[in-house]
Image (spheres, helix red, strand yellow):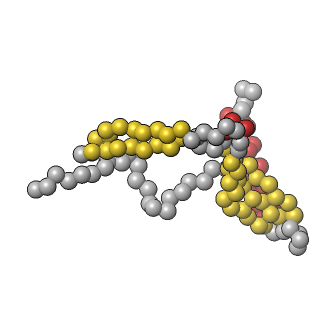
Amino acid sequence: MKNKKKIISKYIFKEDYNPKYVNGAFGGMGPQGEFVVNFYLERVALPNSQTFEIQEGKLIREIVEERKPADHEQSLVRVVENGIIMDYQHAKEIHRWLGEHLKNFEQNFLKDE
């Protein structure tokens, strides 16, 4: 029997798994009175490239390459992933729903501030 090479992963996700994190939004009123909201992630660009060499299921070495540009600390990457368009009634429902969750958060997590 041949010695099979394998990689054991702690987390296995479907190929199309792509979690979304939002740290901002912008938008306004559309030309026909609709509410337009675009969500984005804004972060400092990633400065490093990582490569791992694995042999017989064991990590042999990690190669880290610096790729930091001169203006790295002053640069931001803004990625607009998606947005939503709502009519007035849906905007009111989202506002009500979000307000209830914010109230719950403030009562349970911010009570000491």
Q: Nearer the viewer, residue 2 or 35?
A: 2
In the displayed structure, does residue 83 sit left or right of residue 47?
Answer: right
Q: Can you name the residue that lies furthest to the left here? A: 1
Left or right position of 90 against 68 = right
Q: Residue drawn 87% across and 64% down?
A: 29
Which residue is pictured at 46% across the width and 43% down the height?
A: 50
Q: Nearer the viewer, residue 4 or 89?
A: 4
* Res. 88 visible in picture: no
Q: In the rendered image of this protein, does residue 68 appear above or below residue 20? A: above
Quadrant location of the C terminus? Answer: top right
Residue 27 image offset from top left, x and y in percent? 82, 58
Residue 16: x, y in percent? 49, 62
Residue 97 vs 33, above or below: the answer is: above
4 or 96, nearer to the observer: 4
Name the image quarter holding the N terminus: bottom left
Q: Give me the residue at 86% from left, 68% from top.
A: 30
Residue 9 visible, this orientation? yes
> Which residue is farthest front?
70
Tell how many labels: 0
Quarter holding residue 18: bottom right
Compared across the picture, whether 62 is left or right of 90 comes to left
- The percent coordinates of residue 72 (x first, y second) are 67, 39
70 displayed left or right of 93: left
The quarter of the displayed image where residue 39 is located: bottom right
| Residue drawn at (73%, 44%) of the image | 102
Please tell me in which quadrant of the rendered image residue 104 appears.
top right
